Image (cartoon, helix red, strand yellow):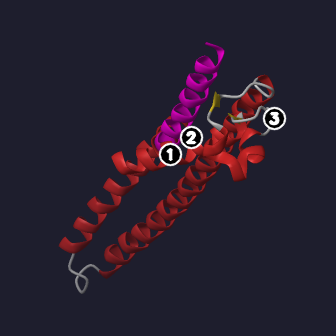
Amino acid sequence: MATVYVWLLVLGSVVLCNFVKMLLPSISSYLSKVFQKNVEDEMEMRAAIQAMKKELSSINMMDEFARYARLERKINKMTDKLKTYVKSRTGQQTKIKWVVNIVYYILQAVLMISLIWKYYADPVTVLPSKWISPLERMVAFPSGVAGGVGITCWLVVCNKVVAIILQAVA
């Protein structure tokens, strides 16, 4: 009964980790929206630039050169300010993405290490020895039980299989 519990626990942990990994881009974009409050200012600046460009197109450059030049300088100044906002926002998004990925991988490592630590001596499942005869000692690591599949081997195999299945589904 204990081996079934360990098998399900490891499989559930691996599926959960891979599912969360698929959601990392969505989590990053959501956190970007939460932490960035200047989006409204940026939208207002874009609308103001569009309005000024529309006004600029209605002005005759030959007749009202001074007004045309002032408005053009104002548009250029606001466009430069908008570029600075966009560059800052992009940098913040990149930082948030990195932090989310780092936190995910740290939590995944802690989960896997704690599972290995807790079930170090228990085989996840026991197979007939001749099925895995040339690799029996490696597959049984760290439990050392003949024919047993150790948790480290099970974690690696489950992680690869679940990742392949989730990529095929997505």
Q: What stretch is highlighted in magenta?
A: 1-24
Which residue in the structure is indicated by mark 2?
158
Q: Where is residue 64 in the image (x, y as percent from the top left)?
A: 27, 78
Instruction: Say if residue 119 shows up in the picture.
Output: yes
Horizontal side of 73 relative to 98 (left or right) equals left
Image coordinates for residue 138, horizontal then vertical, percent: 76, 47
Amino acid type indicated by mark 3: Gly
Q: Where is residue 33 in the image (x, y as percent from the top left)?
A: 47, 39
The residue wearing badge 1 is: 161
Q: State if disc 1 and disc 3 touch (CB < 8 Å).
A: no
Picture quadrant of residue 76: bottom left
Residue lying at the far bottom in this picture: please name it. Answer: 62
Say what secondary structure mark 2 lies in.
Answer: helix
Q: Name, please, the residue furthest toward the top.
A: 1
> Is there any visible trace of residue 106 in the rendered image?
no
Q: Does the magenta-highlighted stretch encompass residue 17?
A: yes
| Gap in angstroms between the C-alphas marked 3 and 1 | 24 Å
Q: Distance between the residues labelled 3 and 2?
A: 20 Å
Marks 2/1 in contact by CB < 8 Å: the verdict is: yes
**Residue 144 tag number:** 3
